[in-house]
């Protein structure tokens, strides 16, 4: 299994840690070794939600505390063993995550973080009001093993190590699955993820459900280790802050981050507390505060990512080859022999000969589309049809409403009126991922790459919408990468690409979703003359393959060679619709958009 193979370094670490735990006999240091593993596990649970989606949670103590009180109260009132109560706590945590996620995911940014903070504070006061200010687990001297009350504390450390190993394995399984790829895409650019077909709410709910289960299981085990539970010790603000700190210090969005952070910060804080706590009360909090300051200055994304970036710069080819080989098969593996199809070649013909006869029923029909923002009417009663296999250009001055129309077409905005029919089915009211699933692909005026992912993984995200298996998704992604001429760059990080390569990668990501119609928003922006010609060739080849395209662009010299028809917008309304020849010679278009220089160029 790929997850197990990739965790070989962790298993070496775990074996070394177990050896140290067996050697250490001092109860204080044994307790410290256990706490490092507990907080690393809790950090991993926080990481599944916040590290992979980017939604910062200040309220993970809610799940931790639910788990701790499940163990304490279940043992006191029902005389159940922790061996049963820890899985039960995980189930309660999963349910709590689901219940918390439904209302809270309506919020974003700081509002989400503050809303999450409210949950553990509310539970803290509830448990105090219920009279559970201090709950002590009953001692079971007759059957200590059944209640995890071992005289030898090394057993607790080994159990904590098993718990951490389980958390690491679960996290790595998430990382290497469609689940983890969707979460990372949401984190790096949620709008691009939606346009690529990802149902962001569904994946966030799954993330908080799993995260809540993991955090509650850790909290349940923590209660067994301490044998005393108080509301402040499990629901307090510092509990959530500790999970956040160890993860941020080590690196978010990776299994190693919480482990690195806990291994460094917990022993440092505990040792200084033991030595200097009488002189500087609360010195642990000072250490965590200093860790955050150092982190912001030296490694804003954490120690792991800092080391990874240094390694990437030192051995770029080695790491890039590893990424490429692990994500995308070669074109031959996908059933696409290298160079067999003309569309996979970056140097495409420049003749404008793709336009088929117009279909009797348009593939896309836009009727009476309108949108206002307050008193501003951004789009006013816009109507046009797009026959299958054609390229429609939408032009107009800045502020004419071009990008707003795209956002209305693929679900980012809800129109005030009108309809958008794709093969007779109205897309109005559907969310972006549903519009993508219906067959509408999209690129953006301002490029939206998943910067921390390779080209291969960026395109793979787009392939998931119509691929039932990961192998099929990789095949579709490999084909799309080849179609735009980026096969040689599949393993490179998106953050390292040029503007031209980013534009091609975004196009490949949209193509991987097998769209019937493609919306290209200023896809030539920022390109040099030769690069723009190459992009025009790629777009033309897609139309020759039967893809229907709507393109917004200001580079008129390229547009008149590319499109079949123009729709000209001015102040949110359609000024004119027609062939490139008719539009570029119309006095109204020249006056509103093209200007006298274009008129002189057209006559020369």
Image (cartoon, helix red, strand yellow):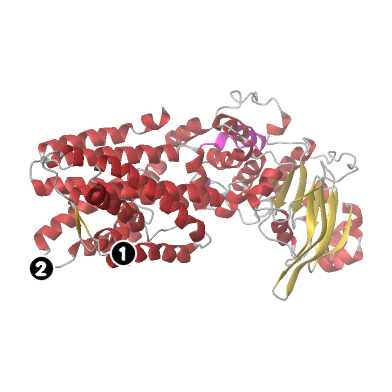
Measured as percent of width and height from the top left, residue 68 is found at 28, 52
Query: Does 341 appear above or below 74?
Result: above
Task: Indicate the secondary structure of the residue bearing disc 1.
Answer: helix
Q: Of all residues shown, which one is farthest toward the front? A: 78
- The picture quadrant where one finds residue 446 is bottom right
Viewer-proximal residue among 345 and 333: 333
Magenta stretch, main secondary structure, is helix
Task: Indicate the secondary structure of the residue bearing disc 2.
Answer: loop
Query: Dot 2 surroundings within 10 Å: few (below 14), some, or many (20 or more)?
Result: few
Left or right of 31? Residue 347 is right
Marks 1 and 2 sit apart, C-alpha to C-alpha, by 30 Å
Residue that carries the numbered disc 2 in the rendered image: 279
Residue that carries the numbered disc 1 in the rendered image: 124
Q: Which mark is residue 211?
A: none
Viewer-proximal residue among 358 and 126: 126
Left or right of 461? Residue 375 is right
Q: Is residue 481 magenta?
A: yes
If the image is split into quadrants, where does the N terminus sit?
top left
Viewer-proximal residue among 506 and 318: 506
Measured as percent of width and height from the top left, residue 235 is found at 30, 60
Looking at the rendering, the stretch of residues picked out in magenta corresponds to 478-496
First-in-chain label (1 vs 2) = 1
Query: Does 604 appear above or below 115?
Result: above
Query: Dot 1 surroundings within 10 Å: few (below 14), some, or many (20 or more)?
Result: many
One can see residue 19 in this view: yes
Viewer-proximal residue among 31 and 395: 31
């Amino acid at each position: 299994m790929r997850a197990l193979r990739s965790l070989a370094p962790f298993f070496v670490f775990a074996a070394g840690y177990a050896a140290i735990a067996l050697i250490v006999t001092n109860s204080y240091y044994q307790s410290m070794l256990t706490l490092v593993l507990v907080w690393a596990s809790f950090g991993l649970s926080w990481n599944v939600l916040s590290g992979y989606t980017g939604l910062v949670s200040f309220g993970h103590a809610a799940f931790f505390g639910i788990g701790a009180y499940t163990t304490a109260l279940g043992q006191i009132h029902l005389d159940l063993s922790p061996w049963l109560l820890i899985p039960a706590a995980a189930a309660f945590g999963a349910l709590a995550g689901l219940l918390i996620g439904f209302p809270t995911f309506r919020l974003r940014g700081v509002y989400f973080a503050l809303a999450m903070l409210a949950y553990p504070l509310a539970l803290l006061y509830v448990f105090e009001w219920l009279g559970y200010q201090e709950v002590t687990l009953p001692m079971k001297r007759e059957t200590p093993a059944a209640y995890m009350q071992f005289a030898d504390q090394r057993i607790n450390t080994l159990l904590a190590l098993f718990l951490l190993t389980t958390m690491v394995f679960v996290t790595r399984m998430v990382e290497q699955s469609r689940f983890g790829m969707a979460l990372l895409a949401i984190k790096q650019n949620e709008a691009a993820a939606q346009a690529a077909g990802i149902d962001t709410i569904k994946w966030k709910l799954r993330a908080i459900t799993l995260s809540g289960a993991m955090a509650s299981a850790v909290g349940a085990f923590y209660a067994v280790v301490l044998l005393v539970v108080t509301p402040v010790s499990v629901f307090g603000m510092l509990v959530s802050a500790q999970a956040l700190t160890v993860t941020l210090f080590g690196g978010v969005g990776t299994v190693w981050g919480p482990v690195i952070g806990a291994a460094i910060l917990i022993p440092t804080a505990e040792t200084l507390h033991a030595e200097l706590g009488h002189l500087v009360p609360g010195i642990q909090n000072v250490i965590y505060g200093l860790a955050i300051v150092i982190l912001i200055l030296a490694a804003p994304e954490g120690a792991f990512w800092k080391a990874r970036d240094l390694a990437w710069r030192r051995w770029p080819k080695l790491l890039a080859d590893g990424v490429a080989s692990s994500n995308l098969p070669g074109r031959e593996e996908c059933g696409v022999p290298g160079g067999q199809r003309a569309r996979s070649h970056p140097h495409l013909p420049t003749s404008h000969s793709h336009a088929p006869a117009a279909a009797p029923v348009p593939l896309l029909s836009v009727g009476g589309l309108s949108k206002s923002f307050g008193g501003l009417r951004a789009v006013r009663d816009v109507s046009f049809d797009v026959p299958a296999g054609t390229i429609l250009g939408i032009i107009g001055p800045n502020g004419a409403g071009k990008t707003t129309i795209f956002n209305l077409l693929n679900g980012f905005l809800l129109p005030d009126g009108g309809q958008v029919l794709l093969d007779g089915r109205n897309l109005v009211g559907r969310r972006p991922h549903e519009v993508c699933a219906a067959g509408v692909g999209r690129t953006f005026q301002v490029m939206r790459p998943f910067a921390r992912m390779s080209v291969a993984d960026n395109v793979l995200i787009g392939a998931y919408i119509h691929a039932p298996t990961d192998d099929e998704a990789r095949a579709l992604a490999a084909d799309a990468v080849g179609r735009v001429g980026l096969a040689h760059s599949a393993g490179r990080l998106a953050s390292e690409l040029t503007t031209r390569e980013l534009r091609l990668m975004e196009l490949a990501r949209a193509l991987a979703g097998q769209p019937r119609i493609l919306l290209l928003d200023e896809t030539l922006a920022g390109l040099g003359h030769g690069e723009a010609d190459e992009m025009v060739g790629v777009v033309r080849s897609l139309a020759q393959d039967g893809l229907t395209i709507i393109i917004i662009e200001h580079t008129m010299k390229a547009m008149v060679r590319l499109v079949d028809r123009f729709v000209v917008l001015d102040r949110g309304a359609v000024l004119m619709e027609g062939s490139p020849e008719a539009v570029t010679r119309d006095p109204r278009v020249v006056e509103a958009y093209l200007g006298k220089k274009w008129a002189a160029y057209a006559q020369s």
